[in-house]
Amino acid sequence: MRTADSGRLLREVVRLFTQAQSVVIQCNTTTNSQCNLLAELARSGPLALSELGVRFRREKSWVSRSVEALAGHGLVVKVNNAADSRKWLVTLTDEGLQSVNAWNAALDNHAEHLLAHLSDGDRVAVEKSLFVLLKAMKQD
């Protein structure tokens, strides 16, 4: 398979998988971008507003509005930053963490359901390929 064909195949798999995953969970009180922000906080722990902007490649105003909206839903709080008193840290509330954990469980179950359609040999091959791709993405 040529590289261009592999690129199209990967994009199509990602598109269909993302589309299917968005059906599995509904971010009822937040936008998809805000759901991603919550997931990042769950992965990394408390972050400064500026760091959230860097990670999401968004302007400070977008980050501030998103954090305020999430705080309004009780999913995050801003706390003092002991390392730099000029910056707030954004952290998940217990409710925010429970939401992210529930979404992750539903998404993991969906992925397992999809992989269950594969033969044992194909599943092993796909999982091996995913590890190789993940390694390449982390190096990029």
Image: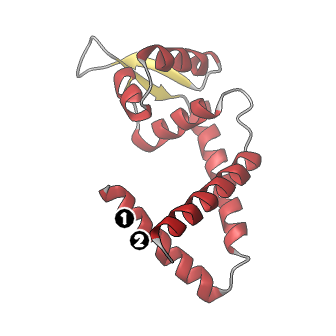
Classify 10 Å Cα crowding around label 2: few (below 14), some (14-19), many (20 and above). few
Which residue is at a point 74% across and 31% down the rendered structure image? 28
**How far from the left and from the top, in percent, is residue 15?**
64, 53
Residue 64 position (above or below residue 7)? above
Up the image or down, 62 lies above or below 117; here it is above
Image location (x, y in percent) of residue 49: 39, 21
Residue furthest to the top: 86
Nearer to us in this view, 6 or 67:
6
Outermost residue, left direction?
Answer: 83
Residue 45 location, quadrant: top left
Residue at 44%, 70% (x, y): give it.
131
Which amino acid type corresponds to the residue marked 1 in the rendered image? Lys
Which residue is depicted at the point 60% across and 41% down? 100
List x then y, in percent, for residue 102.
66, 46
Is 90 rendered above or below residue 3?
A: above
Please tell me whether mark 2 sits on a helix, a strand or a loop.
helix
Task: Find the distance from the CA under tag 1 to the CA under tag 2.
Answer: 5 Å
Quadrant in the rendering for residue 86 = top left
Q: Is residue 88 left or right of residue 29?
A: left
CB atoms of marks 1 and 2 within 8 Å: yes
Q: Could you tell me which secondary element the residue under label 1 belongs to?
A: helix
What residue would you read off at disc 1? Answer: 135
Indicate whether 48 appears above or below 121.
above
Q: Please give the name of the residue rendered at 55% of the width and 82% of the height, measured from the top-left corner.
A: 124
Q: Is residue 63 left or right of residue 8?
A: left
Q: Which mark is residue 132?
A: 2
Disc 2 residue type? Val
The image quadrant of residue 85 is top left
Label ID, residue 95: none
